[in-house]
Every structure is written in C-alpha cells, then in structure tokens.
Amino acid sequence: MTDRAQLADFLRTRREALQPEDVGLQRGPRRRTGGLRREEIAALCGMSADYYARIEQQRGPVPSEQMLAAVARGLRLTLDERDHLFRLAGHATPRRTVHTDHVTPGLMRILDRLADTPAMVFNGLGETLLQNRPAIALLGDDSRWTGRARATVYRWFTEPEARRYYPAEDHALHGRVFTAQLRAAFTRDGRASRAAEFVDALLAVSDEFREIWAVHDVTATHLDAKRIAHPELGIIEVHCQTLVDPGQSQTLLVFTAVPGSPSYEKLALLSAVGL
C-alpha cells in the first residue's frame, strides 16, 4: 500500500539534503535556499519537472518501479534508502544481489565531478549503467540499447554498429578483450548466471565468438589505451583509468588524453560542444 505522505516527505528531505556541488552543478549567486530545486532533481532522474512535482505534492499516479529506480539514482540514494523508497510507494524492494545495477552514491559523486571528462559506469557484464555527456559525445548513447544488446560484448558480436567507434585494425584486439571480460564474469558467477546466458547466446550466433572463446584467453581483460574512431573528429587516442567497486561489481571508466596532444584538444572540443 502506498504511503503518499511519507513518500512525498522522504523525497523532499533527500532533495533538500543534496547540494548543487554534490551532483556537479554550479551554485549560482542567486540561489538563496539549500538543497536542489524540483526541476533539477527531475533532470537528474530523466523525467519531467511536472511529473516529479506531482509525486512530492501527493498527486498523480503511483510511480512505477522503473520510475522509482530513476528517482533513487537521481537522488543519490543508498541501497537501504532505495529499498525504503520502494516500500513507501507500495512496491516490493528490488532483489538484493552482489551485482545490482543501482550505482552507488560514491561512484555517482565522482562521475558528477567529471563534467568535462568522458566517464561511464558499467557492471560486471559490461552493461552501461550511466554515462556523462562527454562520454555520450565520444561513444554514443548506450541507453538506447535494450535486452542482451545492453552488454558491449553481445553488441560487438551481433551488431555491426558496435564496431563503428573503433578502427578496423583494432577490432580483433577488442574482440579478445570483450571475450576475456565475459569469461571472467562467467568464471566468477557460474553456470546459472546471466554471464552464462550471454555465453550460450553468443556461441549460438557468432562463429567469431566461438573461435575466440575456444582459446580460453583470460589475460586480455583490460586496455590501458585505445583509439576511438569518432565520426566527426577522426581518431582520438585515449587512456583508460578505472575505479572498481568490488562490492557492487561496478567499474567507473574515465577517458583521458595526453595534455597538449591533438587527442587532448579533440576531447576538449567534445566536452565543449557535445559533438
């Protein structure tokens, strides 16, 4: 049963507890009240300001589980706070797993502070959970993918579009890396896991994947540097720094370039104009 009053009060208190700096926003000189405005939270949640306002005002339909998950992410809630939010809305709490897709507030805070640097968070299966704007400008918007295609490794072997951001001469290397990453997840999570489902699906549809999988390469799980074939700016050489949250099996990936290099200038241009 939905407790609209408590739901509205909980959202308001969490909104007012967040500061602009907590989510990567500038504190303007005319801001006189603490916390974030409703329209700012709505933007962080990916919903209209009117929809969010109606929840805080105890109006409108009860939010769906999908919308609640977006609110939890926008408000930077912990897992306990997320579960509380779901209960107040009358929904069962999401099943707690080691590999939840709920991005932790710590990783969110770091991502918020990388407004001018491409960065993204993905889970142990290579499914993108969150991208900042420079990352979308660099590699495209991964939120458009659904189902198995959410995982980079699945797209790599089934969707030709997945390879357009990398030079053709680097494709073989990326195929080995993505396969090694999937094997690591498969070994860690076991036969009854989602990783195993991806393995079975790819073995059934991709000759290339079958050949790489048969090699049992477990070493090429990460690239410190890679080349991005941007459709408008050409080749961009980036270095890849990662921060791993082992408890959630999530990784924050940050793309940088050597200062003063042509690639550095291209990344700066991406961030400035959002190509």
Image (cartoon, helix red, strand yellow):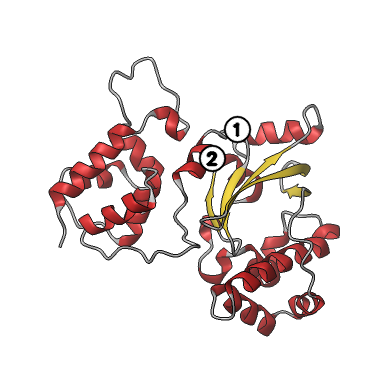
**Residue 54 appears in the rendering:** no
Please tell me which residue is depicted at 78% across the width and 66% down the height of the picture: 176
Q: Which of 67 and 19 is in front in this view?
A: 19
Q: What residue type is labelled 2?
A: Leu
Mark before the other along the chain sequence, 2 or 1: 2
Q: Nearer the viewer, residue 195 or 119?
A: 195
Badge number at residue 116: 1
- Residue 210: image location, x then y, percent: 75, 80
**Quadrant the N terminus occupies:** bottom left
Residue at the farthest right position = 169
Label 1: few (<14), some (14–19) or many (≥20) C-alpha neighbours in 10 Å: some
Does residue 12 appear to the left or right of 256 in the view shown?
left
**Residue 103 appears in the rendering:** yes
Q: Name the residue under label 2.
A: 111
Please tell me which residue is depicted at 61% across the width and 30% down the height of the picture: 272
115 lies above or below 158 = above
Q: Which of 144 and 29 is in front in this view?
A: 29
Please tell me which residue is depicted at 30% across the width and 25% down the height of the picture: 34
Quadrant of residue 259 in the image?
top right
- Residue 58: image location, x then y, percent: 15, 47
Does residue 13 appear to the left or right of 112 in the view shown?
left
Label 2: few (<14), some (14–19) or many (≥20) C-alpha neighbours in 10 Å: many
Please tell me which residue is depicted at 69% across the width and 66% down the height of the picture: 156
Residue at the farthest top position = 29
Cα separation, mark 2 vs mark 1, equals: 10 Å
Q: Nearer the viewer, residue 157 or 128?
A: 128
- Residue 244: image location, x then y, percent: 60, 50
Q: Helix, strand, or loop for circle 2?
A: helix
Q: Which amino acid does label 1 sit on?
A: Asp
- Residue 66: image location, x then y, percent: 35, 60
